[in-house]
Amino acid sequence: MSGLPLPFYDNRLLFGHAARPGLLAFEAGEDTVKIWSRAGDETRVLEEPFRPFLLLADADLLKDFKGDVVVTPLDGAGTYRWLAELGSWSQGLKARDHSQKISQCAPGAPDAPYRFLPDSTQQFLLRSGCTSFLGMGFESLRRMAVDIEVTTAPGFEFPNAARESDRIIAIAIADSTGFTTVLSGALMDEADLLRECTRIIRERDPDVIEGHNIFRFDLEYMEARARRHKVALAWGRDGSTLGSYPSRMQIAERTIGYRRYRIRGRHIVDTWILAQLYDVGARDLESYGLKDVARHFGIAAPNRTYLPPEDIPRVFREEPARLMAYARDDVLETLGLSAILSPPYFVQAQSLPLSYEAVVLRGNATKIDALLMREYLHRGRAVPSPSAGRAVAGGHTAMLLTGVAKGVLHVDVTSLYPSLMLTQEIAPGGDALGVFPTLLRDLREFRVAAKRLAREAAAPAERTLAGALQQTFKILINSFYGYLAFSQGHWNDYDAANRVTGEGRALVQNLVARLDELGAAVIEVDTDGIYFVPPAGGDETALVAALESVLPPGIQLELDGRYDAMLSYKMKNYVLLDARGKLLVKGSGLRSRGIELFQRRWMEEMFRLLLTGQAADIPALHQRWQADFQAHRVPVRHFMKTETLQESPAGYQDKVREGTRNPSAAYELALRSQRPYQPGDQVSYYVTGVGARVKVNEAAKLAVSWDEAAPDENTAYYLAKLDDLYDKFRPLIEQDGLRPAGETEAPAEPSQATLEF
């Protein structure tokens, strides 16, 4: 338990009305719910009554329903004015089906006269006001990381649990108490590995099982091999086995298909997913592989064991101890990565009517909707139906100057949209109780207090919790505007969303006009921030004060960036050089993962020369890279391309056959592979053949097949890419200083060998 006195937890609107400490997990059954809790070091389980519910627009919808149902009217003018409580979960499902049959509307349809939430745990938490982990610090959570190593039969590139010859050869386990072990396939057979892993999980009794890509690899593989050996993976706190079902989640523009696993009484957290959620805002991860992410966050041990995946079968045969060291390092990095990325979600679980596992996997707008619904149900008030979607205008963005600027400042309107919603009293029209603005106001005040506590707290655990609180409050605060235009939000309001962006555009345009009056050179404007070169000889404090004079009361401006130089390339794509000499590359056009590593490395070297006044050295840089390609000195990881499959290979095949999409190298290689690829999987490949204008889908080979002793990459193809990259930036390389955006020479159109980015 945490000893940090935090007044935030007294806010029942945010942290639930039940205020029950130490609740770890919930498992709703037919008419009862099991609740696991902790008092001191003791973990307990108790059962409480559970009645699932439907929300109804018309009480007569269930008038002919044969079952245990109690229908209660809800106050207010919302669409769903009746609460129907059922005697059991199976009765709830029957009532849902009955409502669908009578109304001829599918569950979740915008015009359906009923609402049924398919997550039984969420239903219980909404009605009970309970949340997870109250009174606990993140360090009190018993976390266990699990990682497996597998062998692949000769002649195959990827492991396949369905092949008899492929098997688990190591299971590494580490938990947050310091316990670590590696179960070796050199000492026991596969069935015994799985039995011993199960025994350790039951004995160590973790609250959370963690793993890197655990949903889409480790658990699927372990489940398949356990089925082969008739071993029960009884990991549940009640002795139950793993359960699973197909699921999908959206992370930015990617839809990831995976198999959602559940362990009764415990949660599963996938650090591969956490890394992607982190990168939506940060956009500074080169890949989501465990080793790369661990290096990024500085948690890779100096003497960490690294093994190429293709060497694992050989190392297992010849040096099993080395493979066990590799597996141990993997699981320790997973545990360390979770310690960095999980705390904000731990705090969200203390607030939201969702399980800890669901908090990681659900979108932010869904979370805001759950907070609103919990309060409306608590007060016995009707719930509105979502408004029909329509267009929402964006914020003010503009690129006014291109080229290289020296001595650049960045000012930012602090929490622009949330601040406008509060100062201009913009809220959903359907929120009769005023829950939306109350939550937003409380969250903003709490974040300020949490940031102060994070700075002042003496103990590391207290700093961790306060830091997680402020990060959680920030995430939720920034989600309130998006919720207004969330198509599934019961309190959404597109008119309110448009008013917010309209007020924001006017405010930022006033700031730009004021900077012009003061003699500053505005480079780029992006919704709530402005990059500019200040007038010569000006005082920064006086400049910020002059800008604040055009802001309405309650809106704050902060000077949050000073940069030695900036390259303005195109809208939302720029490079900054700070006083420490660190390059910050922003924008998908300059950071796209769709380009090969050698292009990113070339650009980063070129950017540094350009921003430090050494543009004359860029031709020599280009010649060096050309010579390295011609001499085959560039390793495959620099020129291979990695693509994420957005759909199943079978779906891709159908579209190619129908002529609705072009052939793709990644999908063609996936189809030829023995691995059962699925959406979200990544394929790395390079291009062979002769000449720059080859058909990539026909000339591509998997990166793992490249042989350093007999390199067969298409040098002409990659040299053409290098030349086109140089030509693309040549106008800016040769330009002296800044020019109005419309006056800069347009980059040459790329050839077929060039990737647009």
Image (cartoon, rainbow, N blue to C red):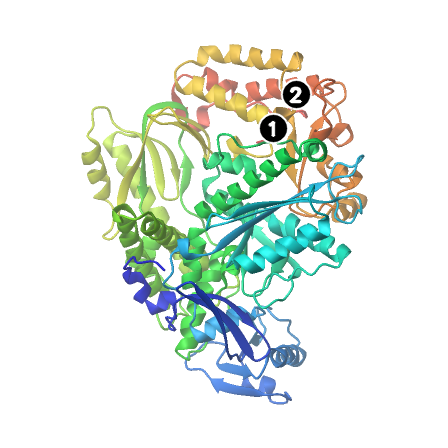
Residue 15 versus residue 749 in the image, above or below: below
The spot of residue 160 in percent (x, y) is 75, 45
The quadrant in which the C terminus is found is top right
The correct choice, above or below, for 379 with respect to 530 in the image is: below
Viewer-side residue, 100 vs 309: 309
Residue in the image at 33% along x and 43% along y: 508
Residue 630 falls left or right of residue 530: right
Q: Secondary structure at mark 2?
A: helix
> Label 2 crowding class (10 Å Cα cut-off): few <14, some 14-19, many 20+?
many
Q: Amino acid at mark 2?
A: Tyr
Q: What is the CA distance from the residue labelled 1 to the residue labelled 2?
A: 10 Å
Residue 351 is drawn in which quadrant?
bottom left
| x, y percent for residue 516 | 28, 33
Which of the marked residues, 1 or 2, is nearer the chain's N terminus? 1
Residue 256 falls left or right of residue 336: right
Q: Quadrant of the N terminus?
A: bottom left
| Amino acid type indicated by mark 1 | Glu
Of 555 and 304, the residue lying toward us: 304
Give the x, y percent position of residue 517. Answer: 25, 34
Taking 579 as reference, is 231 left or right?
A: right
Disc 1: CA contacts within 10 A as few (<14), some (14-19) or many (>=20): some
Please determine whether, in this image, residue 251 is positioned above or below residue 626. Answer: below
Q: Is residue 733 visible?
A: yes
Residue 718 circle label: 2
Q: Which residue is mark 1?
A: 596
Residue at 65 percent across and 63 percent down: it is: 241
